[in-house]
């Protein structure tokens, strides 16, 4: 599904190198987690994969289903099946959630040469998805993320994911700012979208999210590299001992 | 009526025509508005006129002349409708009176000129709740036409009217609207101005808002070589509400969009609420101007005055000049103002693109988002939806 090879990334306007040779291979239907201390490059990886400006790839490659991601604009990556759930979903006053979602869905379909979804069919589709995710219909009528609580914003990300049906989902610290109940709701949403044809890359500081979204593989990232990979037990080890021991091993 | 015109002519002779040295004309050059020959402006053809599906009574003015054949039968329950040439007695006394009192403390020479020379206009006396909106629809057919139109609206106590004013009146136009909002009356004004690139317009609204009354005016400006929209609103009765809002955007060639909102809100009674909400989207060397004042007179306690002016710059070649002014002579009031200039928010743009929305479409959505606060000032949902639809259509057509 997602293949990252020897990815080197620096900030565009500074000499600061952030990713120093990341290798990662996520198979179809798998859930991978990336953990790591602050400043290890986790969020940068998610931004570089989704095409945010301000970064320069100096070496390496990233492909999604064989397609060179790094050559595509952000909207093209989305149409190719990539989805980034933001750590801080953006508020867009004056643009209704439904208008936004329908614009996004139809833009992606158009890019893939598929027919657009009519307003009626779209309404049906969103209502159905919202119901499954236990999202209040009232939330759909409001402007994108405006006045949403932290939990509502994250659930709105999951709703977008459910409607857009991406192949590769990156969750960037989706648990940040959520209480336990809200986190569980979000995790339930993610779990309901798990599928043999859909993969997840879950970026998180803490093990607690992984109690709810069980990963197949856990990676530890530090100083711009993946320093260790293993099963779910690796996350438990971090939770118990912190990152210091792991870092000491490799440095 | 002759007396009103003569006294306006005398006022104009006394104050003279505006020049760049006048404080409120420093940023807008009045010369093209005064030039002997009307600068040419190609008329803009609209496939489906705005508000086509809305029930209303439509009065059409083509190149500044009332077009009876194109207009509806001017009968509307709750409203007495007359033309300027047949002005009834009330109108003869009212015509030019708010313009005259609105000349102080800042002179408005174009409005005086309008009162002295207006060739046509609509006189409306609203005696009850108007059954439908009244629609003044402007059409331009000649590339060198000139229009001087003067409308008067008198809302009696408790009366209600929605006035729609749409289109480009002429290649060059001078429009005045005088509105008296009686106690407890409600007046809604929605004004999508024409879309031709070349037209030049100076307009002035003079309003007096009585006790417990509501005055709301929203203007949408899309294109126009030069637009100067002035509004002089005075709250004269306690607990009155006056809102004035504008959304402006142009996409002509370099420097083809100059848009100036000059607003003066006076609180002359207690407990009044006023809002000024002005948004401008600038690109291709456009210039946006906002000069907005809130004056709170002695004794106008418990006043709540608010003013915001914002510009969204889509490129680096534009300029936005803002002059917010507060002058307060009462001690128990709440007044605030703000002004911002900014580019498209890159984070929001990335958010939309990451969901698959192409860049140009994402920019269009963020433009709509920027204008939302101004459009929110329209109370009627059907009218707001139509304004929004026009904007969406316009943004879609002008993409890429």
Image (tube, coloured by chain):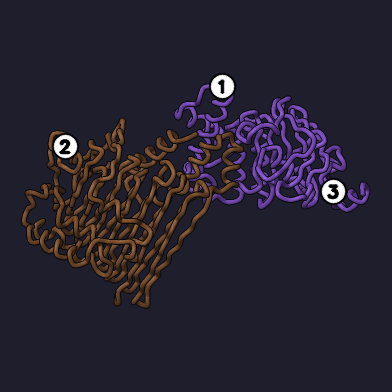
Q: Please say if B277 is above or below A42.
A: below
Q: Chain of mark 2?
A: B
From the image, which quarter does the N terminus of chain A lie in? top right
Tag 2 near tag 1, CB within 8 Å:
no
Q: Is B213 displayed left or right of B116 in the figure?
A: right
Query: Chain drawn brown, letter?
Result: B
Residue B122: x percent and y percent? 15, 48
For the residues bearing labels 3 and 2, Cβ distance under 8 angstroms:
no
Q: Residue beneath label 3, please?
A: A238
Q: Chain A appears in which tint?
A: purple
Q: Nearer the viewer, mark 1 or mark 3?
A: 1
Q: Which mark is residue A63?
A: none
Q: How many angstroms separate mark 1 from mark 3 (CA)?
A: 45 Å
The residue wearing badge 1 is A113
**Helix, strand or loop at disc 3?**
helix
Q: SS at mark 1?
A: loop
**Front one among B272 and B39:** B39
Q: Earlier in the sequence, mark 1 or mark 3?
A: 1
Residue B183 image point, x, y percent: 20, 62
> Is residue A136 found left or right of B169 in the rendered image?
right
Q: Quadrant of residue A111?
A: top right
Near-viewer residue (A240 or A45)? A45
Q: Nearer the viewer, residue A10 or B303?
A: A10
Name the residue carrying label 2: B71
**In the rendered structure, the residue with mark 1 lies on which chain?**
A
């Amino acid at each position: 599904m997602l293949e990252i090879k020897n990815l080197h990334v620096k900030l565009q306007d500074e000499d600061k190198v952030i990713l120093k040779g990341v290798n990662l291979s996520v198979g179809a239907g798998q859930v991978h987690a990336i953990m790591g201390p602050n400043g290890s490059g986790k969020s940068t990886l998610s931004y570089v994969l989704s095409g945010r400006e301000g970064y320069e790839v100096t070496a390496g490659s990233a492909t999604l289903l064989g397609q060179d991601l790094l050559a595509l604009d952000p909207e093209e990556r989305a149409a190719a099946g990539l989805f980034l759930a933001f750590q801080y979903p953006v508020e867009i006053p004056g643009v209704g959630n439904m208008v936004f979602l329908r614009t996004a869905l139809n833009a992606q379909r158009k890019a893939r040469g598929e027919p657009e979804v009519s307003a009626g069919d779209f309404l049906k589709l969103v209502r159905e998805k919202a119901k499954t995710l236990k999202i209040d219909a009232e939330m759909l009528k409001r402007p994108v993320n405006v006045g949403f609580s932290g939990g509502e914003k994250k659930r709105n990300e999951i709703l977008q994911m459910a409607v857009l049906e991406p192949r590769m989902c990156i969750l960037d610290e989706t648990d940040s700012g959520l209480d336990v109940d809200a986190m569980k709701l979000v995790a339930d949403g993610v779990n309901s979208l798990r599928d043999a044809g859909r993969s997840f890359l879950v970026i998180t500081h803490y093990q607690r999210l992984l109690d709810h979204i069980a990963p197949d593989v856990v990676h530890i990232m530090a100083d711009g590299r993946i320093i260790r990979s293993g099963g779910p037990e690796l996350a438990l080890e971090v939770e118990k001992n912190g990152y210091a021991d792991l870092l000491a091993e490799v440095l | 009526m002759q007396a009103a015109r003569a006294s306006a002519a005398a006022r104009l002779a006394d104050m003279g025509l505006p020049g760049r040295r006048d404080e409120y004309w420093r940023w807008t050059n009045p010369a093209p508005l005064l030039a002997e020959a009307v600068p040419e402006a190609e008329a803009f053809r609209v496939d489906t006129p705005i508000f086509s599906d809305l029930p209303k009574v439509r009065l059409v003015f083509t190149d500044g002349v009332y077009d009876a054949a194109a207009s509806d039968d001017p009968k509307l329950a709750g409203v007495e409708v007359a033309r300027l040439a047949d002005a009834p007695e009330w109108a003869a006394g009212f015509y030019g009176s708010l313009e005259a009192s609105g000349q102080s403390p800042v002179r408005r020479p174009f409005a005086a000129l309008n009162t002295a020379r207006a060739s046509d206009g609509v006189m409306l006396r609203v005696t009850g709740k108007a059954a439908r909106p009244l629609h003044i629809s402007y059409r331009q057919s000649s590339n060198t036409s000139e229009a001087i139109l003067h409308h008067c609206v008198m809302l009696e106590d408790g009366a209600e009217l929605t006035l729609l004013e749409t289109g480009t009146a002429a290649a060059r136009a001078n429009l005045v609207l005088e509105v008296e909002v009686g106690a407890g009356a409600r007046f809604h004004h929605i004004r999508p101005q024409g879309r031709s690139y070349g037209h030049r317009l100076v307009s002035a609204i003079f309003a007096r808002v009585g006790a417990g009354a509501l005055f709301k005016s929203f203007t949408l400006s899309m294109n126009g070589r030069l637009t100067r929209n002035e509004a002089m609103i005075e709250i004269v009765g306690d607990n009155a509400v006056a809102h004035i809002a504008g959304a402006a955007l142009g996409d002509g060639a370099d420097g083809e969009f100059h848009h100036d909102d000059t607003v003066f809100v006076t609180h002359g009674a207690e407990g009044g609420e006023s809002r000024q909400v002005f948004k401008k989207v600038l690109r291709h060397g456009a210039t946006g101007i906002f000069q907005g004042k809130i004056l709170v007179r002695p004794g106008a306690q418990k006043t709540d005055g608010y003013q915001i002016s914002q510009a969204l710059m889509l490129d680096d070649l534009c300029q936005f000049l803002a002059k917010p002014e507060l002058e307060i002579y009462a001690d128990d009031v709440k007044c605030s103002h703000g002004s911002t200039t900014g580019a498209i928010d890159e984070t929001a743009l990335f958010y939309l693109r990451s969901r698959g929305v192409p860049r140009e479409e994402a920019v269009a959505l963020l433009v709509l988002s920027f204008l939302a606060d101004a459009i929110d000032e329209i109370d009627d949902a059907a009218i707001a939806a139509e304004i929004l639809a026009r904007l969406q259509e316009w943004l879609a057509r002008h993409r890429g």
